[in-house]
Structure formats: structure tokens, C-alpha cells
Image: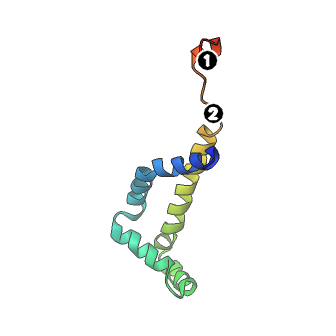
Amino acid sequence: MNPQSAHWLLLTLVNIPVYLGLGRIIFRDWDGFMEAIRLWTSADWWLTLEKQWNLDRWDTARMPVFVVCCIALVLLEHLMFGHSTVPRPATQVVGLL
């Protein structure tokens, strides 16, 4: 595994508690999450989404908002921390080792 893909994998794994907290805020409980999954994975999903969008826009938009927030979190962390380099120890800089 190259360092770049390891960096993305590490960012994704470290944020699992944040994903759970964000899901708790957006969906309130596991039933709300499962309902959103059911809505977005139904066989006639487009017709279901159109009908549901007219009835309740927030319930329909929960899953895309959650996915976009999770992806944006990882991207922002990559932009903040991804370009930094690990400094060499002072003994290597001086040349003692």
C-alpha cells in the first residue's frame, strides 16, 4: 500500500466515531437510518423519492446530507493535514546518527 492510499484509509478509519455522532445528529436513531436506507435502495427509488420529496423534504434529504458531510470531513482533514511532512529528529539533522 502506498503512503497516499494509507493516508486516505487512516483518515477514513479514524473518523468512524465522528460518522456515528454525525449520524446520531442527523438520523436520531438506528430506525431513522434504516428508513433512509430503505427509501434510497427501494426498487422504484426514483418514483419513491419524488413522492417522498413532496411530502417531507428533510426525511428525503437526510442520506445525501450524511454522505456529503462524511466525505467533506475526510476531504477537509486531508487538506488540513495531508500536505504536512514529518520532521526529522534533531539527531539526524545534526548528523549524529
Residue with the mark numbered 1: 92
**Along the line of sight, the residue nearer the viewer: 20 or 24:** 20
Q: Which of the 4 image quadrants contains residue 46?
A: bottom right
Q: Amino acid at mark 1?
A: Gln
Are discs 1 and 2 less than 8 Å apart at CB? no
Badge nearest the viewer, 1 or 2: 1
For disc 2, the neighbor class at 10 Å (few under 14, some 14 to 19, many from 20) is few
Seen in the image, is 29 located left or right of residue 12? Answer: left
Q: Which of the 4 image quadrants contains residue 29?
A: bottom left
Q: Position of residue 22 (x, y in %)?
A: 43, 55
Seen in the image, is 20 located left or right of residue 4? Answer: left
Q: Is residue 8 above or below residue 40?
A: above
SS under mark 2: loop
Q: Which mark is residue 84?
A: 2
**Along the line of sight, the residue nearer the viewer: 49 or 7:** 7
Q: Position of residue 30 (x, y in %)?
A: 34, 67
Q: What residue is drawn where x is 59% and y is 15%?
A: 97
Q: Amino acid at mark 2?
A: Ser
Number of callouts: 2
